[in-house]
Amino acid sequence: MIALTELHGCLILGALMFGLGLTAAFTRRNTILVLIGVELMLNAANINFIAFWRHAHPADIAGPLFVMFSLAVAAAEAAVGLALVFAIHRHHHTARLDRINRLKG
Amino acid sequence: MNIPWITHHLWLIPLLPLLAAAVTSQMPKHLGKAAGLIALGALGLSFLLALCALAATLEHGRTFANVPWFDLGNGQFQIGWLLDPLTAVMVVMVTFVGSCIFLYSLGYMADDPRRKQFFCFLSLFAAAMLGLVIANHLLVLFMCWELVGLASYLLIGFWFEKESAADAARKAFLTTRVGDIAFLLGILWLGREAGSLLFFDHGHGCLEAGALARLGAAGIVGGLTVSTFIGILLFCGAAGKSGQFPLHTWLPDAMEGPTPVSALIHAATMVAAGVFLIARVYPLMSPAALGTVACVGAFTAVFAALIGIAQNDIKRVLAYSTVSQLGYMMLALGVGGLTAAIFHLITHAFFKALLFLGSGSVIHGCHGEQDIRRMGGLRGPMKWTFATYAVGMMALAGFPLLFSGFWSKEAILHAAQNWQVSQLPFYAGVAGAALTALYMTRLMACVFWGSYRGDAHHPPHESPPVMTLPLAVLALFALTLGFLGTPAWPWFESFLDGRSLHADFHELAHSTHLMLLSTAVVALGVGCGWLLYGRKPRATAGEHDALESLLPGLWRHLSNKLWIDELHAATSIRLALTLAALADWADRFLWGGLVWLAARATVGLGWLSRTCDELGINEGFDGSCATLKTGARALAAAQSGRTTLYLRAIAIGFALLVFATIVLVTGFKIIP
């Protein structure tokens, strides 16, 4: 049996958050909740970044820097995503993903 | 060479009647008389030109004018006109006799509704005949030869409502065609061997020394020299046209045509074309070919005269007489008597045209009756016809001294006697002379002596002057023409030969024995004829012929024309019919069967092709289309438009990709 370290705890937290976000993105029908799920998955990845920096390469600045970039991209993505949700709502009068199926083959 | 004007314009002579034919063919039907006058006028002008041509030959001898017709490869195809004494006398004879007969036709055909067509055909004939005699190219001659045959066909069948006339026209056309095929072969062969078909062409023509030498050296085919072969082939054509045995059967049947046609075409001019042809290509004829000509001619002369004795149709008697006289001409050509043959051709043309026109007058006077058994006693009512007919008869029979036929026949006998090879043609000629005298006496006695045996209510009458005038003119020439060629003053012969002429009465003494012989022979023939028919003319139309009572067996053979028609029917015609039946059978069953098979095969292939199409190709295509469709449906169903499902697919896909990368790239090294 392997003893649980702080790193393991962080990784388990990241994996749970990712699973939570993935489940939300897959199962929620509301577009905003899907976006929240996506945010959760991004942040789970960020936790992994931080955890590996802290316990594997504490001298290397690249870890927290990558997280910074990732947050910036997540913010931009959230903005674009919310804008899309607005546009879709304005067009379809709903934000439910199962109604927005005009790309059906 | 100084070529006279007329040589260059010799083509005008046939052109005038040709124009007349063209004009009359376009005229309305009721202008028959005008058509006749146009035809007569054109031929009269041709006659004047022909006299110019004759005068030119007296001065210049042989002249010719060749003109290029079209370019052929490296060279030119030339045709031309030849003016020599032979052409000149033929042209003058054809135009003169033709004019007389055209004039006569104006009267004879006065009541025919298709008179203008008749004159159109006659003009066409005259044009073709004149083209034939002036041609300096064997192929041109052949073309005119065929045109003459066409005109003859049209005119024999002029009264085509009568079935016998239509049959006779067909028979004439087909029988002469048999000879013409050989003639054409001869022309082609000659053209190959001699290199040219022009008769004279400044040393290159086929009748000139170079070509003759080439032809002599051409070698031997099947036991005969090439020149003999060519000569015999050309003679076959001549035999067809001139009614020589065994192709003579069409000529008596050709008498179904109107009498002027019989006179012009089937006595005076066209049938003489064969004799003219042999005379024209005389330098080509090898001794063996000439021997053939002599034998056929001699046989025909006696053979046809024999048949002529037992015919009852006035025109048929004359037709067999024509065949016989043409045999004489061929005989003369064969034994080397070129000038004698042409002399006889000219005199015969005049007196035979006279006899035929006289017969036409008799037929006209007897209301269309042609059977001599129902004539008789016409001496009284038809004085002009009788007098001229008697002149023609005596010229044909060869009455001594005064009549043209005597001198020309005497020239032929003289030539035959001098032939080195055999004396048989001479004896045949003597026998033919006796037979000729016999059948002509019989004809005269039956027609003009005794009493009229026809319909008593319609007595015979004399013909109008438009018909008797040509008779008188022709009779005059039948009397006088002989003096151009007597042994004492052989102007005609020297003219044709180009030799100097001198009157020599010793020559007359030399041939006295021959003249006495022929006189005796004629006297014998006339005497027999008179004993049989003149002493006691037949009283009724139905009684037996005098000769028939005397020699019934011989008569039966003679009156059936010695079964030559039956011989033809049993041999060549049956052969043709058998071949036709065979061809018909082959057509129906052999080729028809093949066609049927091909059709069936095509239909079968079509069925196969349709089945393949429907079952194989269509089904396969449809099937694959359907599969594609189903697949597309399945794929389209995946495009549900539900974003969450897309996300899931992306996630599963991404996970699989990661897994695959781990497996393929690192090979599970990560996993301890």
Image (cartoon, rainbow, N blue to C red):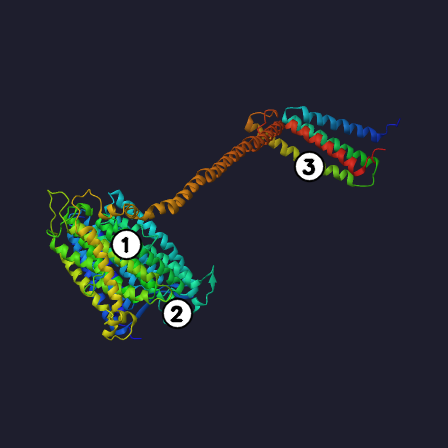
- The three-letter amino acid code for the residue at tag 2 is His
Foreground pick, B644 / B564: B564
Q: Tell which subunit mark 1 falls on.
A: B
Residue A2 x %, y %: 88, 28
Query: What residue is shown with label 3?
Result: A73
Element type where label 1 sits in the image: helix
Q: Tell which subunit mark 2 falls on.
A: B
Crowd around label 1: few <14 · some 14–19 · many ≥20 (10 Å): many
Name the image quarter holding the N terminus of chain B. bottom left
Q: Are marks 1 and 3 in contact (CB under 8 Å)?
A: no
Q: Tell which subunit mark 3 falls on.
A: A
Report if residue A105 is visible in the image.
no
Name the image quarter holding the C terminus of chain B. top right
Foreground pick, B430 / A40: B430
Foreground pick, B621 / B649: B621
Gap between marks 2 and 1 measured at Cα: 43 Å
Q: Residue B346 lies in what quarter of the image?
A: bottom left
Query: What residue is shown with label 2?
Result: B204
Gap between marks 1 and 3 measured at Cα: 137 Å
Query: What residue is shown with label 1?
Result: B305
- Asked if residue A32 is positioned above or below residue B343 in the image, the reply reads above
User: Residue at the spot x=74%, y=28% of the render?
Assistant: A18
Q: Residue B215 lies in what quarter of the image?
A: bottom left
| Marks 2 and 3 share the same chain | no
Q: In the displayed structure, does residue A90 sit left or right of residue B483? A: right
Residue B55 x %, y %: 23, 70
Gap between marks 2 and 3 measured at Cα: 113 Å
Crowd around label 3: few <14 · some 14–19 · many ≥20 (10 Å): few
Element type where label 2 sits in the image: loop
Mark 2 or mark 1, which is nearer to you? Answer: 1
